[in-house]
Amino acid sequence: MFYLYLLIALALLVAAIFLSPLRAKVWVSFAAIAAAALAVAVPSIATLAGGDAIQVASSIRSVVDTGALAIDSLSAIFLLIIGVAGIATALYSRGYLAHYLNKKSSAHISLHYTALVLLVVSMMLVVMADGGFLFLFAWELMTIASFILILFDAERPEVLRAALAYLVMMHVGFIFLVAGFVGAEAATGSASFSALGRCFAEGTNTGIFILFLLGFGMKAGLFPMHVWLPEAHPAAPSHVSAIMSGVMIKTGVYGVIRVVSQMTAVEQIHTAGVVILTAGIVTGLWGVILAAVQNDVKRLLAYSSIENVGVIFIGLGIATLSMAAGHTGVAMLAMCGALMHTINHSLFKSLLFFGAGNIYSQMHTTLLDRFGGVAKYMPVTAILFLLATVAICALPPMNGFVSEFLIYLGMLDSVRDGVNTLYAAGGILALALIGGIAVLAFTKLYGTLFLGSPRDHHVAESEEVDSLRIAAMGIPAAGMIMIGLFPQYAIRIVERTVCALTDAEAIFIDYYAASALSRLSLTALLILIVITLLYVIKSRAQGSRTVEKGPTWGCGFTSPNIRMQYTGESFAEGLESIATSLTQNTVEGRAVGKSEIFPSTHNYNVRHKDKIDRLLAEWWVELLRIINKRIMKLRTGKINHYILFALLFLVAIFVLSLLNLI
């Protein structure tokens, strides 16, 4: 009966959204998402606090096995992430879509909010489903809902292309997932996650793991299956980008963890660990290098999501290898770091996309070189964006530092103990490179956006956004600060899950919470106190002085102007020499020639596009063009031809039935 009630509730919700007044649609959607979040939050918190897994709906076997719904400790973490992000996203959309209400039809807005609610609900079903038909149904519903959300500005050609690319790539991944479940069904008679343990116990089913890794990796944005992500996020509205990048891609991480947790053979676990670690290192490095050279705010943030997925998989890979080696302590630390980074990334990436939405709604562009000095006109956005920038660069006292610190600690312990030394050393080197380039990328992003002088008159005409959007940004910001300042308590969120996944005892986590993380908390608080004291001293010192304003000294040059400051392209020029082999560049305009002593006005913009896109994404564009060209020949406009086609189809069905092929 649960499934029937769920379908009835969704039908009533869709009717309520479509029938409600235009400006009330957001609040109907917000109420639905908040109710769903509260409904799953109570049992999730109870489970994480030490309770047993909760059965939401039992398995129903009719024509197909629909699967069961349950909340265990792993599901509980992701349910809380989805709930918090869903509430923040719905709240933020109220202000972001306000100026669209007079441009889009009521049905268009209704469809958008319906898809938003369905996306949140489908993600919840994904992490509660025990595989099988129900899981695949929820996964497909999640894909369709996000596809509709991306298509909000469907009149723009680039949006249509990005949405179609996303849909095609997601269904390629879906085929891999179906193949994985079919393989499990053939081996065990059941297509559930719980049956994978028996499937892997046979020792010859590594291929099934690869199928699941490809299917879930497509959603997570693992290299080289990441090409949809930098196209879809810039095309979608910013609040949609926030929930897709901050939460939806984590369902891929959830799936990989769920599959690996069913492995018992040491050789299989070791092989899986090597594959996951390698994929994480390549994904992280590729993502951060491509992020650093981007000159579009949302494309930079999209590539940064790829980088952070790589960081999560590095932690997961080290944990898996350590479990194969029987090194429980390292496995516990790395898994804690991976799960904490999953939580942390959902917070600071949502906040970054919300900030990008704020500046886009004011300036109607996301090109970096059109900004500059935005902090003077949007100070609250600038402060919140700075917090997220510090967090994503894994700098104290913010939450990003906590999760990467745990991963580093696990890898250093692995090297010290001589277990998986080569793998751990490679992970340390990769994570250090990723962190360094991430600082470069986000220094470029924040400096070009918020500092310096305005490069466009739209910047000087901008103003701070409405209070609802600021409140929505405050939700992830509060979580970031709390985790950054009190990591010894935040780790309790993942404690029970880590113990279940790594066979570690809670005493290990208690030890690190009481020692390393407590000292980390003290350090973060001291940093915060020092920053506050310096600000107070500076304010008091300046309060008794007359501050004179004048142009910045330009090394003797007497006519400085806004063009004499770093652009996004010039900031990362050194790194671009390394990234040249990874990108295909599209140049608009002409650069200043070396022989131009007194250069005239130039317009120059470079777009750095991933070369992998040509290999894995552009093929389907040409394929669809050819298919469409062939199909169009069948549209003759004559009824007798269409009757003939129908007759041929029926004959084909009849022949295939006689041959027992269908």
Image (spheres, rainbow, N blue to C red):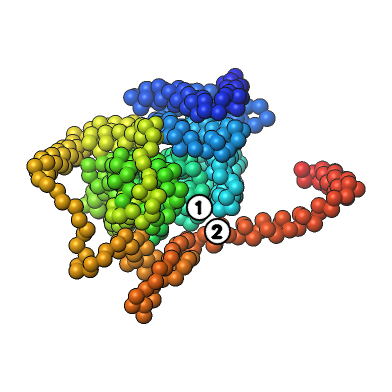
Frontmost of labels 2 and 1 is 1
Between 639 and 195, the residue placed more toward the observer is: 639
Say which residue label 1 marks.
231
- Secondary structure under the numbered disc 1 in the rendered image: helix
Which residue is located at x 85 percent, y 50 percent?
Answer: 637
Residue 451 rendering spot, x and y as whole percentages: 29, 52
* Residue type at tag 1: Glu
* Residue type at tag 2: Leu
Give the left or right position of residue 393, taking residue 131 as reference.
left
Q: Report crowding for label 2: few under 14, some 14 to 19, many 20 or more residues within 10 A (C-alpha).
A: some
Task: In the displayed orientation, state which residue is furthest to the bottom.
Answer: 595
Give the left or right position of residue 229, taking residue 324 as reference.
right
Residue 111's label in the rendered image is none
Q: Report crowding for label 1: few under 14, some 14 to 19, many 20 or more residues within 10 A (C-alpha).
A: many
Residue 163 rendering spot, x and y as whole percentages: 57, 48
Give the left or right position of residue 406, taking residue 242 as reference.
left
Residue 79 rendering spot, x and y as whole percentages: 43, 31
Residue 616's label in the rendered image is 2
Residue 317 rendering spot, x and y as whole percentages: 37, 49
